[in-house]
Image: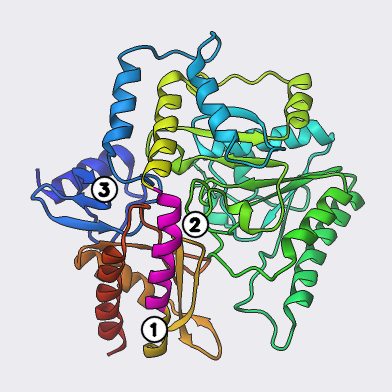
Amino acid sequence: MSDLAILKRRHALLGEKAPLFYEEPVHIVRGEGVWLYGPNDEKYLDGYNNVPTVGHCHPHVVDALAKQAGKLNVHTRYLNEEILNYGERLTATMDDSLSRAFFVCTGSEANELAIRIARCATGGMGIIGSDATYHGNTSTVMELATNRKMGGPKRKKSNVRSVPFPQMYRAPKGMSEGALAQAYAAEIQAAIDDFEKRGIKFAGMLVCPIFANEGLPDVPLGYFELMQQIVHGAGGVIIFDEVQSGFGRTGSMWGYENTGIVPDIVTMGKPMGNGHPLAGVVCRPELGDAFHAESTYFNTFGGNPVSCAVGNAVLDVLEQEQLVEQAAEVSAYLRSGLDLLKNDFDLIGDIRNNGMFFAVELVKNRKKKKASKKKPLRIVNMMKEKGVLISSIGADRNILKIRPPLPFTTDHADIVLEKLTECLIEVEG
Ligand SMILES: Cc1ncc(COP(=O)(O)O)c(C=O)c1O
């Protein structure tokens, strides 16, 4: 069937507004490692997908899934060791204080549950998020999304507040890093004060530790420590959404390891099952107990034996193939290549990365730092035509997002650099 015919069927069934990548959407039929293939064996280097984090269709993961699916798959209300083998191994990768696990199927569910845990444990309702965030698609979590297109709320009366996400790139001139951290932290205090003024008891703050959807800003040193002091001081808890940053993406197993603080609750998803719908919440046990004192939680599919076998296999591959270490090494290599490109192209305003998650911010003018509006999208589409899949992020979608599966090597990084150079020459020329 032609791509056009598939598109028509899709529009009729899913609606014309159902999101699709690229001006001319990519038709893919199989994946292997860091490569995706079209119906006529067209080959795309995957510089975008973080869900198949140990590589598309990794044989060890596929094998574990098939074996367990042929043995037993049922919900979690029977005794079965699969969930314990996985859960204990998972929490052992985290700080000792984070030892209570809940299993769900999506990042949205994980954040929804984390908010419920925070609210039960503190007796509060007020949740703070960042002002350019996305944490999922359930109605409670959606309230945190400030982008109206995403269904953001009318916030004054609601139980959520947003604060500016911390960043160095557009900081006021001459402001020290410490002063900047203080200024952003003061916004958190102001949001808590506003809750108090309106009689809303504070429950906690939910943020991604690398602010991935905000555009991966460089965070001023000291911000997270101040956040923790303020949030704990006001009786709230810190929830880190590690749906993007977890499982080695940052060159450490968890994004929080680079923040200087340990959160009270961690949520996770996307890479956890390498594409199988597996997500979770890990928290301090007393928070889990406080939640269970008020509420039972059951998730039909969350933590089933097949999901746990898959999760375990993902951890096997991360360890055996030393992918977290590889992420640290290859990311340093790709970063230095991108830094060199910045010397050559004025369009590049800033380059940021957190391990194998890269943000190449494109601007009209380096001095004024005004977002480049059309060129980022053009480059994303041109890269696709050249066989490399990337995307864009940020409120203005002006930040190229490169976030490949972790088996990415320096050879793959070279392909990205070569094709990106060609695109930059074409759009700047
Ligand atoms: C930081 C973050 N949290 C949560 C989610 C929601 O995860 P899911 O789509 O699995 O519900 C996303 C999805 O993009 C995300 O980026």
Q: Nearer the viewer, residue 85 or 368?
A: 85
Residue at image position (62%, 58%) is: 258
Q: How is the image coloured?
A: rainbow
Check contact, mark 2 vs mark 3: CB within 8 A. Answer: no
Q: Which residue is mark 2?
A: 251
- Dot 1 or dot 3, earlier in sequence: 3
Residue at image position (51%, 34%) is: 279
Confirm if mark 2 falls within 8 A of ligand 1: no
For residue 334: magenta? yes
The amino acid marked with disc number 2 is Gly
For residue 281: magenta? no
Q: Which residue is mark 3?
A: 33
Relative vertical location of residue 17 with respect to residue 380 in this rendering, above or below = above
Query: Magenta part of the protein: which range?
Result: 322-338
State which mark lies toward you, 2 or 3.
Answer: 2
Relative side of 36 to 139, left or right? left
Mark number displayed over residue 340: 1
Residue at image position (61%, 39%) is: 111
